[in-house]
Amino acid sequence: MRHWSLENILVGRADRQTISKFAKGRDRYIGVGLLASAALLGLALSQSIVTVQSFHDLNGSYSLIDGMVALFKSGQPAVAMLILVTTIVVPIIILSNAFELWYKHELQSDKFPYKAQRLRRYGRLWYLVFGSVLIGVYLIQNSEIEAVIHAPVYYLTVSLALQKLAIARMEPLINAVQFIEDDMK
């Protein structure tokens, strides 16, 4: 017998008929994976991710947020905006939509098909984000500047990988729900 709080984390509130209620086996842990992804993303954003020497007037250790502010101040707003979109905005939007679909929107609600379609689009956008992060890490490691990448960059990549895993595991559940809804009409 599971504890009620663990059951709440796994499948959400008992009074809601969300997609999490119909998950079986390992798929029941998708919500936990989303929570872990959010925690790792928070660590990646707040901890020092890189130490640089003489790069666009930047010297020292920077978190993603500190680095973006410093890039804006040093006259590199395009680079700062690229970092903002690829490492903060899109991952947070993907997590938010996945959480809503997993825990909030009931299968019978009018918003469920809309949110499911949106999650599919974000799943495709994920490749661009993950590729951008990997290219950024590669460029920093193989550039002429003196830069040391710290562990939070790996937190970011694991967070993004957990997001994709959750989206990929949710897709068959969403398809099954939509298939059942189509049969009922």
Image: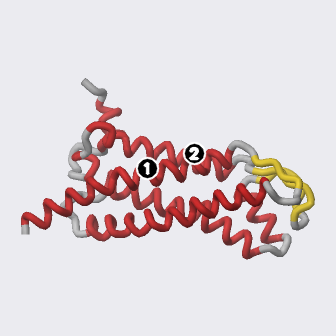
Please identify the residue farthest to the top as the structure is shown.
Answer: 1
Point 14% across, 63% down: residue: 181
Which quadrant of the structure image shows residue 107? bottom left
Task: Using the image, tell me which numbered label, if any, was put on residue 37.
Answer: none
Residue 69, compared with residue 26, is above or below; it is below
Q: Residue at x 23, y 43 (%)?
A: 14
> Residue 135 appears at what percent x and percent y?
67, 61
Circle 1 — which element? helix
Dot 1 or dot 2, earlier in sequence: 2
Question: What amino acid is at disc 1?
Answer: Leu
Which residue position is annotated with label 2?
40
Question: Neighbour class for label 2 at 10 Å: few (<14), some, many (≥20)?
Answer: many
Q: Is residue 182 above or below residue 138?
A: below
Residue occupied by mark 1: 165
Residue 47 is situated, as x and y percent measured from the top left of the image, at 71, 47
The colour scheme is secondary structure
